[in-house]
Image (cartoon, grey):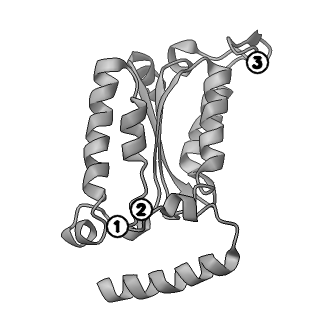
């Protein structure tokens, strides 16, 4: 029944929280079942030149969006899952038309509460960008890069936090963590 609904859809959204640096077990089980319906004796070559067994292209080759949510702030946290989706795209001839990654989800809780909006002023722009992503999909069949950048932006009110995360100094990061604990405890 699910595969028939997927075949009838114009586009798919694969959404998952990150659990232990990977997609949820539920989504992974879905993909395992999805691959199992293919004929493993019928070898094919994808448009990207990758060999794989036959899969039902009415389902497998749909354009899709990867929607990933994780509590951690590090860019490394969703990396395995995003890599999986890029590989899936190449093997299945399925265009990945967007990747929305919301890190720091544990900071804002359910998100749409005034406390989160006061502590993280950028969250309103992120919510607006998610709405724009839906409009982009309808109008263009993909999420525009500008919209994707807005949706995936850092939400912490710390100037240049994205660059700070890439600094290899452990001592500096420990100092930041200590100060952030004071900030979050004083905000509650």
Above or below, 105 relative to 17 = below
Q: Nearer the viewer, residue 45 or 141?
A: 141
Q: Secondary structure at mark 1?
A: helix
Q: Secondary structure at mark 3?
A: loop
Residue beneath disc 2: 105
Residue beneath disc 3: 50
Q: Quadrant of residue 150?
A: top left
CA gap, disc 3 and disc 1? 41 Å
In the rendered image, is residue 188 in sight? no
Residues marked 3 and 2 touching at CB (< 8 Å): no
Q: Secondary structure at mark 2?
A: helix
Judged left or right of residue 124, residue 59 is right
CA gap, disc 3 and disc 2? 35 Å
Looking at the image, the residue that sits furthest to the front is: 159
CA gap, disc 1 and disc 2? 6 Å
Residue sitting at x 42%, y 88%: 182
Residues marked 3 and 1 touching at CB (< 8 Å): no
């Amino acid at each position: 029944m699910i595969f028939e609904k997927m075949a009838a859809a114009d586009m798919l959204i694969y959404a998952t929280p990150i659990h232990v640096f990977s997609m949820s077990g539920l989504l992974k089980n879905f993909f395992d079942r999805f691959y199992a319906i293919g004929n493993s004796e019928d070898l094919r070559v994808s448009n990207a030149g990758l060999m794989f067994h036959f899969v039902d292209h009415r389902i497998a080759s749909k354009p899709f969006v990867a929607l990933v949510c994780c509590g951690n702030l590090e860019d490394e946290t969703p990396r395995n899952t995003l890599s999986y989706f890029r590989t899936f795209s190449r093997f299945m001839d399925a265009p990945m038309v967007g990747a929305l990654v919301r890190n720091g989800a544990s900071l804002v809780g359910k998100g749409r509460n005034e406390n989160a909006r006061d502590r993280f002023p950028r969250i309103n722009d992120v919510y607006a960008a998610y709405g724009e992503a839906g409009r982009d999909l309808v109008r263009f069949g993909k999420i525009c890069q500008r919209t994707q950048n807005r949706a995936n932006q850092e939400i912490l009110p710390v100037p240049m936090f994205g660059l700070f995360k890439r600094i290899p100094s452990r001592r500096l990061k420990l100092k930041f963590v200590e100060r952030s604990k004071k900030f979050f405890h004083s905000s509650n």
